[in-house]
Amino acid sequence: MRMRRATSMRTAARAAALLAGLALGSVPGLRAVSAADLDQAVPAAVVDEGKPAAPLETAVLSGGCFWGMQAVFEHVNGVRRVWAGYAGGAASTAQYEEVSTGTTGHAESVQILFDPRKVSFG
């Protein structure tokens, strides 16, 4: 995703990689993110600036701590709003204490409302 400043993009990428690394470190067969991974350059974003006016789009992403992800994506140019919550489990078990047991099927997630003319998955 494109950010206002390259330094912010690198910081956001490092934070996202760290969050993903913490989550993946506890999954058998997946490796955690290393310090060397965090020092790699972030590729340039692909933005569809020439697109005509389009409705806002929604993305749901899961991983790590939803408040950490929310803090990163709220500062991305083109993101209108970010909500933190749970995805994947039953509504009746979407409470922090229950989700923390790891038995509910929930993942900490963010729902992102964004303008596809200003930011893309590239």
Image (spheres, rainbow, N blue to C red):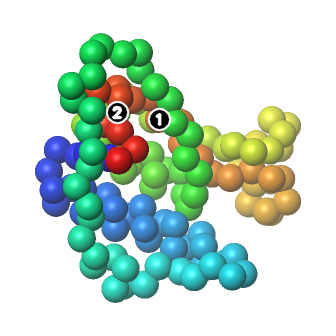
Q: Nearer the viewer, residue 52 or 83?
A: 52
Q: CB under 8 Å between callouts 1 and 2?
A: yes
Q: Is residue 9 above or below residue 47?
A: below
- Where residue 38 sits in the image (x, y, percent)? 33, 76
Real-space Cα distance between discs 1 and 2?
7 Å
- Label 1 crowd bin: few (<14), some (14–19), many (20+), radius 10 Å: many
Location of residue 5 in the rendering, given as x and y in whole percent from the top left corner: 14, 50
Q: Amino acid at mark 1?
A: Ile
Residue 25, placed above or below residue 63? below
Q: Give the side of residue 106 with respect to residue 9, left or right.
A: right
Q: Which of pointers 1 and 2 lies earlier in the amino acid sequence?
A: 2
Is 30 placed above or below 81 here?
below
Which residue is disc 2 drawn over? 79
For image coordinates 56% across by 61% down, the residue present is 64
Determine the image quadrant of residue 75. top left
On residue 112, the disc is 1
> In this orientation, does residue 84 appear?
no
Of the pair 120 and 11, the residue shown nearer to us: 120
Q: Residue at x 26, y 49 (%)?
A: 45
Q: For residue 42, which quarter of the picture?
A: bottom left
Q: Closer to the camera, 43 or 114?
A: 43
Residue at (56% x, 40% y) in the render: 60
